[in-house]
Amino acid sequence: MTSIHDLLQQRILVIDGAMGTMIQQYKLSEADYRGERFKDWHTDLKGNNDLLCITQPRIIIDIHKKYLEAGADIIETNTFNCQSISMADYDMSALATELNLAAAHCAREAVNEFKASSAYDPSRGGPFVAGAIGPMNKTLSLSPDVNNPGFRAVTFDEVATAYYEQIKALHEGGVDLLLIETIFDTLNAKAAIFAIRTYFADINQPMLPVMISGTITDASGRTLSGQTLEAFYTSVMHARPISIGLNCALGAKEMRAHVEELSQIAACYTSAYPNAGLPNAMGEYDEHPEHTAGHIEEWAREGFVNIVGGCCGTTPPHIAAIAKAVSTIKPRPLPIADPA
């Protein structure tokens, strides 16, 4: 299989769209989330999307396949909240390893089924499975108690340990890449980077390629924890990621200036997968696929991006439109390092 490093030199790659948006379309009940195994679980489970990799794996596989059929080169495992700290909300911390393994297997099964179908074009290379590592529901940089700004709900070591367990399971499940995404607190991301490096040192194997994607929360151009885009970039580049980029929080229109800025400072490949516009008064995303794709096509023509796709509100039609829009556009070339 052609390596992702080789493909990134040849063309703009497409990452998938929203998993949660697609799951919502199935209108699953509490009983659907529980399945037979967890029918007597002592907490509510509806909304625990990562659990569906165990209780409704066919749904997750089918969603992955829809994105592959739409033209995605990279699909993300359904593991956005799948580490022990976030899973504590459902009293399922002990299931973190099993859930990540199940998610990786769902994604691999989708790839295998896609490759066996007539929709698969082997000349494109890939597709690749990215192990999704979300930002966690606790932050290392901010206090959850406004009356005690020095308080932290977790320690760096606790966060790194939780990420280590997730990374180990994703790797053992057979992912091709690791994606630290939707970063609003760079210190959490640094704990994930530390965990990745520690894990691969422990098993004495080369690191998988790492993608990093942050989140600019508003027009200020800063993350939720207050970093500028350049500061965020500088803070994580010691990980030597294959790509750095932005996702979530903003639609493509609002994200453009930040994507342009990142393209000018990044020494690695760049990625961007925005929401389908901004949510309406009902909290729903209603930007049409051709509108999202139109914005991203302009980024591509300006030479800003190497990997594009969609976040909240995007669906397979969005990814199909994006894939078509960038299919003939050359990728952003890596900057030439100053020999001095």
Image (spheres, helix red, strand yellow):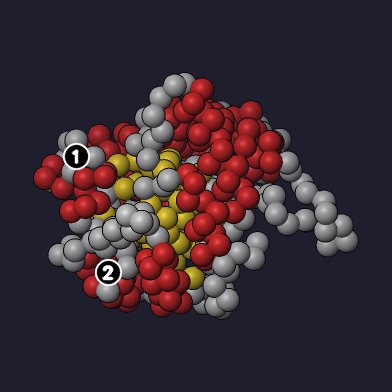
| Quadrant of residue 223 within the rendered picture | bottom right
The type of residue carrying mark 1 is: Thr
Residue 75 visible from this viewpoint: yes
| Residue placed most toward the observer, 264 or 11 | 264
| Element class at badge 2 | loop
Counting from the top left corner in percent of width and height, residue 204 is at 44, 21
| Quadrant of residue 321 within the rendered picture | bottom left
Q: Nearer the viewer, mark 1 or mark 2?
A: 2
Badge 2: how crowded within 10 Å, few (<14), some, or many (20+)?
Answer: some
Counting from the top left corner in percent of width and height, residue 209 is at 37, 40
Q: Is residue 259 left or right of residue 162?
A: left
| Residue placed most toward the observer, 280 or 71 | 71
Instruction: State the residue at coordinates (26%, 44%).
Output: 4
> Of callouts 1 and 2, which one flags the residue occurring earlier in the amino acid sequence?
1
CB of mark 1 within 8 Å of CB of mark 2? no
Which residue is identified by label 1? Answer: 2
Instruction: State the residue at coordinates (56%, 41%).
Output: 192
Q: Which residue extends farthest front?
A: 340
| Residue placed most toward the observer, 61 or 132 | 132
Which quarter of the rendering shows the N terminus?
top left
Which residue is identified by label 2? Answer: 303
* Position of 114 relative to 147 (above/below): above
Instruction: State the residue at coordinates (19%, 39%).
Output: 2
Instruction: State the residue at coordinates (69%, 41%).
Output: 156
Counting from the top left corner in percent of width and height, residue 120 is at 16, 44
Residue 99 visible from this viewpoint: no
| Element class at badge 1 | loop
Q: How many marks?
A: 2
Counting from the top left corner in percent of width and height, residue 105 is at 38, 31
